[in-house]
């Protein structure tokens, strides 16, 4: 038995403290699910479970955001909800979890997706470990470690995410110029795809309340892209760390957004007269050293291609999440992909679009599928790096 993708949708991705900052993460995902369910021929009672990725999980998303989103979407009380956390890979982990559920015949129809409001992720404070202690620790839960284990840091280091990308640049000889060129490419490809109308069909308008005296504001487009960005402008930005290559311009942003897919078996589609758009061929995860977490896609991609019985040459679309330009280039170098390979992030990537952590994997799966449909290709490869040293990958096959 195989798992199939029937439809997908996402919100625009907002900037940190931007247009979507006042919208809760469960509301973001709930609206996407509601719209998807409304436009599909499936009955609401057919949905077995909602599986959603979310990485921050320290505030409004802390208590099973998938279940909350299912309820907010108006799905029946009998539909379940499961939140998964594989950090930046959470949205694609949700897709692969649903893939396994369908292949194990544990249900016929599911929602798989992810959500993140990095704008609304709270500061978190730990409790005192001693009576009358004056110690006070506070962490920003939007990104990076909080309450790290000293034993982990002692053995594996305490590199921040940008520092791990700089480690890759140092280890593999990725230059600042290469990184800036790739970032400019991402912005230009996104602008081209947007002008050609590529993103219109995957975006759901979000109505953001503006108070009692004003009508809701319609957010209809991604807020993070900077289409005027070019290499000279990027070259003027300072590196985040002395001697490093990572800058605010060649890294992904801190963003808000949600994405979801309808997935099911073949029988449920036949019952309702709907053909699936794609099949999940294979999935994989792999671990790498935390100090070079951005190379996680390399072993995950090699593993998933072996499971699928395919090679990189068979892929018509390749989506590697752009956490950092340096990190994607490091993966490309290790995999033998040219930096300018036209299959690689052909519609632009997270440097332009943004990277709301738990939503990105589902967004990439949707974008990859739609890219296949646009060019009538057959296979797409989707992969993301993951903090603390992991990678996740999936091969999708477009169906006629």
Image: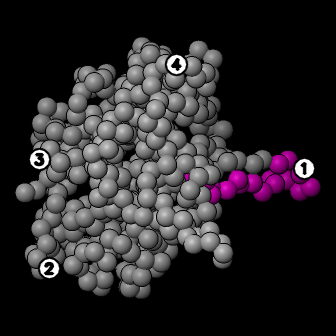
CA distance for labels 1 and 3: 63 Å
Q: Quadrant of the N terminus?
A: bottom left
Q: Is the magenta region chiefly helix, strand or loop? A: loop
Mark identifier at residue 134? 1
Q: Which x, y percent locates residue 85? A: 47, 55
Q: Which x, y percent locates residue 63? A: 56, 69
Mark closest to the chain's N terminus, 2 or 1: 1
Name the residue tied to disc 4. 235
The residue positioned 59% from the left and 42% from the top of the image is: 144
Q: Mark 1, mark 4: which one is toward the viewer?
A: 4
* Highlighted magenta segment, given as a residue range: 117-136
Mark closest to the chain's N terminus, 4 or 2: 4
Q: Is residue 125 above or below residue 224?
A: below
CA distance for labels 1 and 4: 45 Å
**Nearer the observer, 378 or 296:** 378
The residue positioned 17% from the left and 57% from the top of the image is: 278
Q: Mark 3, mark 2: which one is toward the viewer?
A: 3
Name the residue tied to disc 2. 272
- Quarter of the image for residue 288 reads top left
Asked whether the residues under the numbered discs 1 and 4 touch, taking CB atoms below 8 Å apart as contact, a structural biologist would say no
Mark closest to the chain's N terminus, 1 or 4: 1
Q: Quadrant of the C terminus?
A: bottom left
Mark identifier at residue 376? 3
State yes or no: residue 16 in magenta.
Answer: no
Mark closest to the chain's N terminus, 1 or 3: 1
- Quarter of the image for residue 94 reads bottom left
- Whether residue 65 is visible, yes or no, is no
Secondary structure found at label 3: loop
């Amino acid at each position: 038995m195989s798992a199939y993708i029937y439809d997908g949708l996402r919100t625009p991705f907002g900037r940190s403290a931007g247009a979507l900052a006042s919208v809760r993460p469960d509301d973001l995902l709930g609206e996407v699910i509601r719209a998807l369910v409304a436009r599909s021929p499936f009955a609401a009672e057919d949905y077995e479970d909602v599986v959603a990725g979310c990485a921050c999980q320290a505030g409004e998303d802390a208590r099973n955001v998938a279940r909350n989103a299912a309820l907010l979407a108006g799905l029946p009380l009998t539909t379940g909800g499961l939140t998964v956390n594989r950090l930046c890979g959470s949205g694609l982990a949700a897709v692969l979890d649903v893939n396994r559920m369908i292949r194990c015949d544990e249900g016929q129809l599911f929602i798989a997706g992810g959500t993140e409001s990095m704008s609304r992720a709270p500061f978190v404070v730990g409790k005192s470990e001693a009576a009358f202690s004056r110690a006070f620790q506070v962490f920003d839960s939007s990104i990076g470690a909080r309450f790290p284990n000293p034993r982990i840091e002692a053995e594996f280091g305490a590199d921040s995410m940008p520092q791990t990308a700089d480690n890759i640049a140092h280890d593999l000889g990725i230059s600042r110029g290469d990184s800036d060129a790739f970032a400019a490419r991402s912005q230009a490809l996104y602008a081209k795809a947007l002008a050609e109308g590529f993103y219109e069909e995957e975006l759901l308008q979000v109505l953001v309340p503006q108070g009692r005296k004003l009508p809701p504001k319609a957010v209809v487009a991604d807020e993070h892209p900077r289409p005027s960005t070019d290499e000279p402008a990027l070259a003027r930005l300072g590196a985040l760390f002395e001697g490093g290559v990572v800058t605010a311009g060649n890294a992904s942003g801190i963003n808000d957004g949600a994405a979801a897919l309808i997935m099911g078996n073949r029988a449920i589609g036949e019952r309702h007269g709907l053909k699936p758009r794609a099949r999940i061929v294979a999935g994989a995860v792999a671990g790498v050293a935390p100090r070079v977490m951005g190379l996680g896609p390399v072993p995950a991609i090699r593993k998933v291609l072996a499971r699928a019985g395919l090679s990189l040459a068979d892929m018509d679309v390749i989506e590697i999440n752009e956490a950092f330009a340096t990190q994607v280039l490091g993966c490309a170098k290790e995999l033998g992909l040219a930096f300018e390979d036209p299959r690689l992030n052909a519609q632009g990537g997270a440097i332009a679009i943004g990277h709301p952590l738990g939503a990105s994997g589902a967004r990439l799966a949707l974008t990859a599928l739609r890219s296949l449909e646009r060019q009538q290709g057959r296979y797409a490869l989707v992969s993301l790096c993951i903090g603390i040293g992991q990678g996740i990958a999936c091969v999708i096959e477009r169906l006629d």
